[in-house]
Amino acid sequence: HDLRVLGSRLIFLTQTTVGILGNFSLLYHYILLSFTDYRSRSTDFIHKHLTVANFLALLCKGVPQTMAAFGWKHILSHFGCKLLFFLHRMGRGVSIGSICILSVYQAITISPTNSWWAELKVKAPKYIVPSIFLCWMLQMLVNVIFPVYIISASSDKNITGEKNFGYCSSVRHEKTTDSLYAVLLSLPDMLCLGLMLWASGTMVFILFRHKKQVQHIRRTVSARSSPDTFVYFYTLSSVFQVILALFDNPGWILVNVTAMTAVCFPTISPFLLMSHNSKVPRLLFAWRGNIKSPHLRRNM
């Protein structure tokens, strides 16, 4: 039991620390990008909001879950629990929506000019900003009901039907109600994940039909690892969350594994983006070079 608790503490602490530092670094680079002479791409706007959403998900899930693993379970009020669950769900939803928008945009931009997407291909960059803001608004509306039954773990009320999530709890309902609730919450995620798989498959099909674009194929297929990794982790996370909703009294292992899978992609996402976007690390060095005086640069 002691080894199990120690292992969960190390995993939560590592995920949260690495994820927050990674997303903060990437967000810093994008802020730096806006103050340089570099002309940002259309997808950079999506990456910025994806990073903010991941940062929000880690702060509202990883941090309190880590604190609970170390024994600080009764520090949040009812309002604090409701707010954290709502913000985590919103950040998670925007993260899914951002990757979905990115995948569809990439599929449209590489489509042949003589295809039925041709007109949309020209207008696609204009739709990115309103699509991202619409994603934030929809996630706020969809998840506004989610924290209604969330209560503090330190509640002094004697509630018989209560699910304990470590640092917060929720009121238990009938099995049918919980099942329907789990399906309704997972449906938008499943739609986005399905759309992402369709867009990725479309990209591969289009590119491999044009065998002359070998180098382009190699770059795009390599860049697909980010959406694919996203699909794997969030499908696993969605499955665990549905299972958690169906259990009347979920055990310690199920609660912790569900929390671990929920923060997996927000943790590795910034490193995936940086590995497939070589301009981001170079911006820091370019900025450092620009702030040096001409005299210093001549003497270097």
Image (cartoon, grey):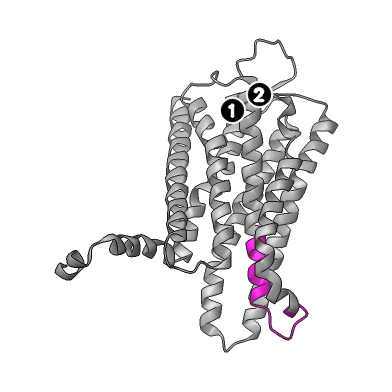
In front of the other: 209 or 146:
146
Residue nearer the viewer, 122 or 215: 122
Residue located at (17% from left, 70% from top): 298
Numbered marks: total: 2
Tag on residue 190? Answer: none
The Cα–Cα distance between marks 2 and 1, rounded to whole angstroms, is 13 Å
One can see residue 201 in this view: no
Mark 2 neighbour class, 10 Å CA radius: few under 14, some 14 to 19, many 20 or more: many
Q: Which mark is residue 252?
A: 1
Whether residues under marks 2 and 1 lie with C-beta atoms below 8 angstroms apart, the answer is: no
The label nearer to you, 2 versus 1, is: 2
Which residue shows up at 67% across the image and 77% down it?
205
Task: Where is residue 281? Give x, y as percent.
Answer: 39, 61
Q: Position of residue 179 (x, y in %)?
A: 80, 36
Q: Which residue is drawn at the image coordinates 68% and 48% (left, top)? A: 136
Q: Secondary structure at mark 1?
A: helix
Give the answer, above or below, for where 254 lies relative to 127. Answer: above
Magenta residues (range): 100-118
Residue holding disc 2: 169
Q: Residues within 10 Å of mark 1 (few under 14, many from 20)?
A: few
Is residue 298 visible from the viewing direction of this image? yes
> Which of disc 1 and disc 2 is earlier in sequence?
2
